[in-house]
Image (tube, rainbow, N blue to C red):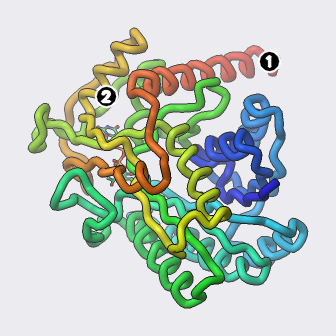
């Protein structure tokens, strides 16, 4: 059985990927510092797959502990690296935190890989590297634009660090860079999902919390963009679809399907939806209201971006399959699950 180390495996995309890996027969080791996740995620994963993954609370910035952990778990076949700080606004306020966390974590892992004879690496990148693309849909060949935030810059720099490392090592490393568009939704069981820390920055958690009455109203950032309804357009991809792509990517390297030592894939649906379309669809499929108000544009927002996922579709044999309606239903089911858990805790029987 192949063994995969998942850094940040307790997080939103990480936890869904752990489930898909386990369902595909992989043995999974999770490391996470729980800075933006909860230990209860392990129980959610176990309820879905029947397997409680091996977990250690480790910060990837901590080289000594990482080394010790890898020493105690030999024969790891690959690493999927999610662990990173990801709030765009926070990165503008605390750039050094972002550069330190995201770059040092990556460098530590890449340094330790040859020492522990680990060859395969999947990196969690983002469509943010394209900025506002000149052409839509955006393919992997589109130029990388100057980053709009320190967060975005860490993704660009990390991609370059991986490229240089793979190149220098010739055949010792294989890496796949996965550029995510906008992951949304939750596992259909509603046992794992996104757990935003405080006030959500991203659209979907804000929509679900507003529908639940946790927030009085959603602010739609701008309706004067050059788009059909004036609101921004994104490529919203179901998180389970996204998670499945990681399983395909790691198998591709382990089974040496490709001769390339480094490959980059866009993970999106190929379809752009506006903020207003998302709100309307969410209300329609779930039969709930999302009070909202149009406000000014959010600084740094890109007007429109959606993926050309053709390379991933063809080379990986992977495709986003879930419909937007089912995805929006899953997001609401997860918010309702969180409300139930909260009510149970308040009533004193956990
Ligand atoms: C951005 C980055 C993405 C990064 C993510 C991390 C781009 C294209 N994408 O996603 O790489 O991983 O941040 O957080 O730069 N919106 C509202 N009201 C809200 C929240 C959002 O109207 O309360 C709108 C935004 O203006 C945007 C859309 O919803 O048009 C999606 O926003 P969000 O979920 O924050 O994701 P991005 O900004 O696209």
Q: Residues within 10 Å of mark 2 (few under 14, many from 20)?
A: many
Residue at x 73%, y 33% (from the top left corner)? 44
Residue that numbered label 2 is attached to: 278
Residue at x 77%, y 83% (from the top left corner)? 115
Q: Position of residue 232 (x, y in %)?
A: 22, 41
Q: Is mark 1 within 8 Å of ligand 1?
A: no
Q: Residues within 10 Å of mark 1 (few under 14, many from 20)?
A: few
Left or right: residue 343 compared with residue 274: right
Splitting the image into 4 quarters, where does residue 333 fall? Answer: top right
Residue that numbered label 1 is attached to: 348
Tell which residue pokes out farthest to the bottom in this image. 168
Residue 88 seen from this side: no
Q: Position of residue 229 (x, y in %)?
A: 13, 31
Q: In front here: 19 or 234?
A: 19
Splitting the image into 4 quarters, where does residue 81 fall? Answer: bottom right
Q: Is mark 2 within 8 Å of ligand 1?
A: yes
Left or right: residue 94 compared with residue 102: left
Residue at x 50%, y 68% (from the top left corner)? 98
Closer to the chain start, of discs 2 and 1, is 2
Position above or below: 18 against 70: above
Label 2 sits on a secondary structure element that is helix
Q: In front here: 205 or 113?
A: 113
Left or right: residue 85 compared with residue 146: right
Q: Position of residue 42 (x, y in %)?
A: 76, 40
Splitting the image into 4 quarters, where does residue 250 fall? Answer: bottom right
Q: CA distance from mark 2 to mark 1?
A: 36 Å
Residue at x 87%, y 73% (from the top left corner)? 71
């Amino acid at each position: 059985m192949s063994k995969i180390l998942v850094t940040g495996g307790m997080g939103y995309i990480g936890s869904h990927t752990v489930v898909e890996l386990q369902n595909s027969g992989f043995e999974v080791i999770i490391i996470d510092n729980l800075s933006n996740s909860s230990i209860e995620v392990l129980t959610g994963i176990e309820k879905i797959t029947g397997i409680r993954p091996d977990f250690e609370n480790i910060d990837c910035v901590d080289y000594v502990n990482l080394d010790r952990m890898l020493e105690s778990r030999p024969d790891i076949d690959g690493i999927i690296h999610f662990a990173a700080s990801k709030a765009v606004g926070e990165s503008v306020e605390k750039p050094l935190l972002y550069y330190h966390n995201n770059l040092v974590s990556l460098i530590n892992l890449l340094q330790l890989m040859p020492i522990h004879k680990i060859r395969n690496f999947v990196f969690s990148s983002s469509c943010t590297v394209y900025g506002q693309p000149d052409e839509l849909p955006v393919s992997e060949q589109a130029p990388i634009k100057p980053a709009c935030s320190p967060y975005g810059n860490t993704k660009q720099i990390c991609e370059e660090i991986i490229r240089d490392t793979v190149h220098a090592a010739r055949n010792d490393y294989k890496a796949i860079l996965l550029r995510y568009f906008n992951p949304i939704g939750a596992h259909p069981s509603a046992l794992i999902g996104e757990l935003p820390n405080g006030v959500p920055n991203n659209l979907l958690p804000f929509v679900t919390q507003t529908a639940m009455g946790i927030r009085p109203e959603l602010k739609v950032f701008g309706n004067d963009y050059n788009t059909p309804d004036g609101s921004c357009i994104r490529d919203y991809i179901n998180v389970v679809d996204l998670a499945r792509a990681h399983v395909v990517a790691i198998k591709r390297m382990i089974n040496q399907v490709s001769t390339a030592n480094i490959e980059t894939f866009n993970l999106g649906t190929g379809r752009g939806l506006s903020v207003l379309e998302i709100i309307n669809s969410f209300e329609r499929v779930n039969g709930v209201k999302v009070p909202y108000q149009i406000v000014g544009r959010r600084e740094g927002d890109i007007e429109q971006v959606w993926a050309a996922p053709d390379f991933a579709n063809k080379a990986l044999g992977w495709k986003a399959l879930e419909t937007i309606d089912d995805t929006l239903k899953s997001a609401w089911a997860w918010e309702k699950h969180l409300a139930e858990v909260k009510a149970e805790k308040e009533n004193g029987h956990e």
